[in-house]
Amino acid sequence: MNMPTNKRLLSGITPSGDGSLHIGNYLGAVRQFIELAKSNETYLMVADLHGLTTIQDKSQLQHNIETLVLNELALLKGFMTVEQFDRIIFFRQSDVLMHTECQSIINNVTPLGLLKRAHAYKDKLQKEVEEDDINVGLFSYPMLMAADILLYQADLVPVGKDQKQHIEITRDIAGHFNKIYKKNVFKLPEAFIPEEVAVVLGTDGQRKMSKSLGNVISMFESEDVIRKQVMGTFTDPTRKHATDPGHIEGNMVFTYLDFFGDPVKVAALKGQYKEGKVSDVEVKEYLFDSLMAYFGAARKAYDELKSNPQLVRDILARGQERALSIAIQTMTQVRNAIGVTTQYSFFDYPKPASGKTISIDEFARVELRVGKVLEATNKEGSEKLIRLVVDVGEEKPRTIFTGVRGFGYTSEDFSGKQFFFITNLAPRKMMNEESQGMILAVDGADTKPQFVSAEGMPVGAKIR
Ligand code: TYM
């Protein structure tokens, strides 16, 4: 699988179970995340609000959140340099209020059927749970997850296969929103799921590794607990004695060793196992040792973090600040797109200094036309006036005077050129001749009038 670079990535983990992570989470999600974080902009969040669907006991939730924070930070610190770690934006979902705001807005562009097809909800129903026993939080879980991802305009979401549908729902919602509001406010994210770890099986060798199934191998438990988990791992049920030839396929100890063992040593062990030359316990001991070595630095980081709560608080505060700055930007765009803005149409604009304003209706009565100057000459006996003979699209050209010679303009500045003219003024006498309109000028910085060119426009065209 090609590793993307220079993208924005977001992923999250729910503090479910007891909040601790297992090697399924690591292989399925965190490992990819760590690799990707080395050459992409990455956001990793503790999805504590998602935990509320199942954990409704205050101290349990707090315990889980703390455990998950420590687990995640320990993995990041254990497998990254300090500089790499510092670049990751690690935060708690509930620390950025916009997640729930965004969820509440995108609710309105999401078809009910889309959520009814979501696996988590359908699975629950199939377990013959009554609808009344399913909370709306579980039902709208994909909405909150969509908000998590869309808020940060993530390009990629590294997750295990069980989350694939959630990313598809997120894309659908983003597409609906952009279409309804005719603006590409949300980026459509893609899932990043390497095939070989899409689903990591549990120690029973049957089902996805999952806390709730009790088939996990932990990373931060005591050595005793982890040894027990390893010793209980499914191997080859056809093998009764260590001298029987054994099978590698479907043997979970070797599956895990492929990730965590030394490849040369693992290849040798596989050969011995097939020939009945090594016992299950010996292979399991090697898996245990390999896990301890592999996660050694992370386990050390875990202990350090646990004894330094201020450091953890500082990391979270920094993450919150950085996440907020992006979430605010997105929500400003969202609010503008949907019309929840502070740009009121009855806004009181400052009045011009003269204190006098004209209404739009009054202004609309001014008739402006494109005119072509057929002839420009100085008015005899005047120091200011230039006489323009102007075609404004009528049967006969009009005579229009402009008094701008004092500003340095000459008749050549007008001759043969096109400008805008006001054509519905009462004629005005100018030194015994009638001016039948007025050329449009605007004040320049030095108050020298500037004429607005209408070159290339149809002569006689009216301005609306
Ligand atoms: P969660 O907490 O259930 O799992 C965290 C990550 O671990 C992956 N995973 C596995 N991958 C392979 N094999 C396994 N046995 C295995 N068990 C778990 C999951 O696929 C996941 O990537 N809804 C999410 C959390 C979330 C989120 C988000 C993720 C909330 N908002 C935004 C990404 C983006 C969840 O409950 O994952």
Image (cartoon, rainbow, N blue to C red):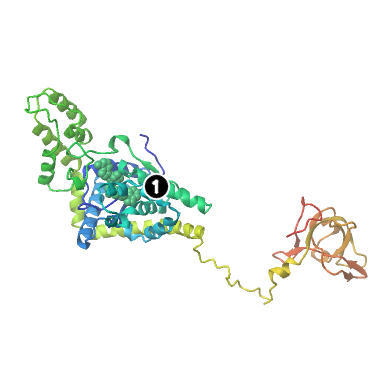
> 396 left or right of 215?
right
Occupied quadrant, residue 358: bottom right
Q: Secondary structure at mark 1?
A: helix
Q: Specify the quadrant that holds the C terminus.
A: bottom right
Q: Nearer the viewer, residue 396 or 264?
A: 396
Occupied quadrant, residue 250: top left
> Could you tell me residue 265's position as x and y percent?
17, 29
Occupied quadrant, residue 202: top left
> 301 left or right of 451?
left
For the image, the number of numbered tags is 1
> Could you tell me residue 296's position as x and y percent?
18, 43
Residue furthest toward the bottom? 355
Q: Nearer the viewer, residue 411 or 1?
A: 1
> Could you tell me residue 210's position as x and y percent?
22, 45
> Could you tell me residue 422's position as x and y percent?
80, 64
Q: Specify the quadrant that holds the N terminus.
A: top left
Q: Nearer the viewer, residue 344 or 372?
A: 344
Residue 126 appears in the figure = yes
Residue at 85% of width from left, 70% of height from top? 426
Residue at 37% of width from left, 37% of height from top? 3
Residue at 82% of width from left, 66% of height from top? 424
**Residue 343 against residue 1 in the figure, above or below:** below
Residue behind mark 1: 169
Residue 82 appears in the figure = no
* Amino acid found under the numbered disc labelled 1: Ile
Mark 1, ligand 1, within 8 Å: the answer is no
**Residue 293 against residue 347 in the figure, above or below:** above
